[in-house]
Amino acid sequence: MKTLFAALMLTSVAAWGQTQIAMMVPHEQEVAPGSVATVAVDYMTLPDNQSLMGLGLTLYWDSSALQFEGVDDVYHNRILAVSFFEHDDGNEDGDVQTDMLGRIAWADWSGNWPGDEPVPLRLLSVHFLSLMGEAGDSSVVNVRAISNAVGYDFVGYGATIYVQEEPAPSLDVDNDGRVDALSDGMLLMRFMFGFRGEALVNGIGDVNVTETEERLIRILE
Ligand SMILES: [Ca+2]
Ligand SMILES: [Ca+2]
């Protein structure tokens, strides 16, 4: 992502003028069903200016796909307020998929925000439990500015969270770490012919019948 920031710095100054940028990282990620996705928000300005009045951000997400789990890594200098339990009733972000929002704001009346910090500066990280179940499903987190510094435009880059594709089941039916015709192939063939229990594993060696049958069912699903 730093490369993208660098590219922005090189290409966009002339086109944009003075801009505050909030970028969610990673821009895209895959998570397994039922696990937590973390997206961070990094900040910079074009041209670089660390003596501004502050920034107010709103993050938007779809609560049917992502359950808010918490915030950390918050940049604490001149933090004004954090609130993550509002409904996006007015559809502020213009995205009908997102129905919840969180707000976070920094303000420095002396105009010295964020202070002398390396950029991109991490402003916060947000954790979402993925409620999505189907491989290929995805959900976006959008970022907008509530208020930005006088004389500055704002550009926000959101994030997309995808459901991880399930890995293909291994053909290592007896779970000995290798795929072998005389053991794994034999088990597969016997199972497909309808053999179960001891008749399935007879002569194959030391294998757990129940676990072997479960692996075969997964392979043949
Ligand atoms: Ca919305
Ligand atoms: Ca094997």
Image: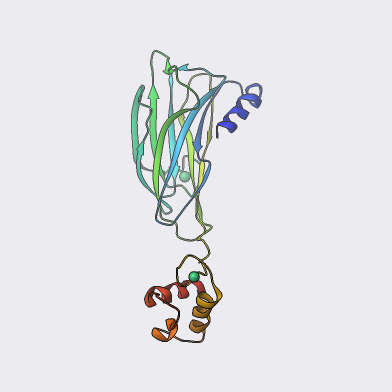
Q: Which residue is painted at 37% across and 31% down in the image?
A: 74
Above or below residue 1? Residue 35 is below
Above or below residue 210? Residue 105 is above
Above or below residue 111? Residue 168 is below
Front-lying residue, 75 or 51: 75
Residue 64, position as x, y percentages in the image: 41, 54
> Which residue ends up furthest to the top in the rendered image?
110
Q: Quadrant of residue 1?
A: top right
**Which color scheme is applied?**
rainbow
Specify whether 76 is left or right of 203: left
Residue 63, position as x, y percentages in the image: 40, 50
Residue 179, position as x, y percentages in the image: 53, 69
Q: Which residue is painted at 53% across and 82% down in the image?
A: 189
Q: Which residue is painted at 51% across and 66% down in the image?
A: 178
Front-lying residue, 88 or 189: 189
Q: Which residue is painted at 45% across and 86% down in the image?
A: 195
Above or below residue 48? Residue 140 is below
Front-lying residue, 220 or 33: 220
Residue 11, position as x, y percentages in the image: 66, 26
Q: How many marks?
A: 0
